[in-house]
Image: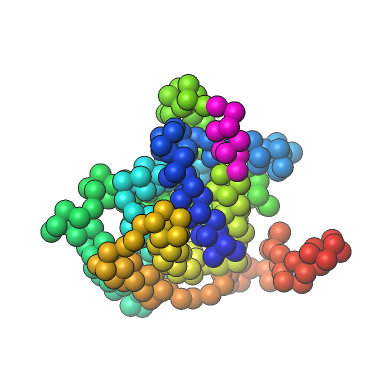
Amino acid sequence: MAVASMSCVQLGVAASVQLSAQVGAEGVVWLRLFWAAVVLLMLVRPWRMRFTRPAIRTCIALGLATAGMTTLYMAAVIRLPLGTASALEFLGPLGVAVVRGRGTARLWALVAAAGVLLLTEPWHGGADPVGVVLALGAATGWAFYIVLTQRAGDEVSGLHALAVSIPVAAVVVTLTAGPWVLGRLTWQLLGIGLGLALLLPVIPFSLELLALRRLTTAAFGTLMSLEPAIASLIGLAVLSQVPRPGAVAGIALIVAAGIGAEASGRRDAPGGPGSSPERPPNRVTAADLARRTAGAG
């Protein structure tokens, strides 16, 4: 689920970079979040479920983090190569892995810092400084997103958390960018936006929410270490962005730091090691997937 999510994200971002020439970074984000909100509200219908007050607060906070992370990252990839922006944003989940890791895990932060230096080359001015700041802001948003997504997944069943958080994110982006974007929209752009919304964020965010129910946040951060490498490959294939040797080395260091920071496995149940061993709600096993694929329910 996590690997499929990363691939969808980077393909969606690569397609968004090309679309941003027509509506700007904010316009692309608004299109994606608007359609994502419509799709989730239609499919999930969150008003049918009872939410506790803490759950509502968590979902709203998740929506704010989603809006900030998505907007900042889209603005960064317009100024930086896709692999570079992804590696810098990955410092968010890496930070979660380092903070929640064990033993010598925190020492890997130094490896990541070396990777960032190789990516940005501050001694040469090789990277757009505004792009770097935007990518680091997106990294902060991603760290909050991971923690809040896991909390929301524990408090709310199914995809109801996303059906609240994504509309919240859409409202936030509408308030900040909507008036400027609406004047540029065409029916064709609205149709493209619907396709992008499925590719990013509906499918990957749904997969991440489900993945975080089965993994520790540290293990999830480790899996996310693959994303800069995936982004570089997609940037090369789709956007013809050939990375510099120093950038390749920097991405490799950040990937290594993510893997080294934490390679632990499954989460305990939300109540901790002593909680009930029963299967969590909506947890899908391989047998369940096989039955559903075969049409057996």
* Residue at 61% in and 71% down: 274
- Quadrant in which the N terminus appears: bottom right
Which of the two residues, 243 or 103, is positioned nearer the viewer here? 243
In this rendering, the count of numbered labels is: 0
Prevalent SS, magenta region: helix
- Quadrant in which the C terminus appears: bottom right
* Residue at 49% in and 65% down: 220
Please say whether residue 221 is visible from this viewpoint: no
Which of the two residues, 258 or 217, is positioned nearer the viewer here? 258
Please determine whether, in this image, residue 138 is positioned above or below residue 83: above
Residue that protrudes farthest toward the front in the picture: 240
**Image location of residue 139, percent across then percent down:** 37, 53
* Residue at 64% in and 36% down: 38
Q: Does the magenta stretch include residue 285?
A: no
Q: Give the colouring mode of the picture.
A: rainbow
Q: Is residue 290 left or right of residue 84?
A: right
Residue that protrudes farthest toward the left in the picture: 123
Q: Quadrant of residue 45?
A: top right
**Image location of residue 142, percent across then percent down:** 42, 52
Please determine whether, in this image, residue 286 is positioned above or below residue 60: below
Please say whether residue 239 is visible from this viewpoint: yes
**Range shown magenta:** 186-195
Q: In this view, does 37 lie to the left or right of 9?
A: right
Q: Quadrant of residue 82?
A: bottom left
Residue that protrudes farthest toward the bottom in the picture: 103
Residue that protrudes farthest toward the right in the picture: 296
* Residue at 61% in and 52% down: 203
Q: Is residue 294 left or right of residue 80?
A: right
**Image location of residue 102, percent across then percent down:** 39, 75
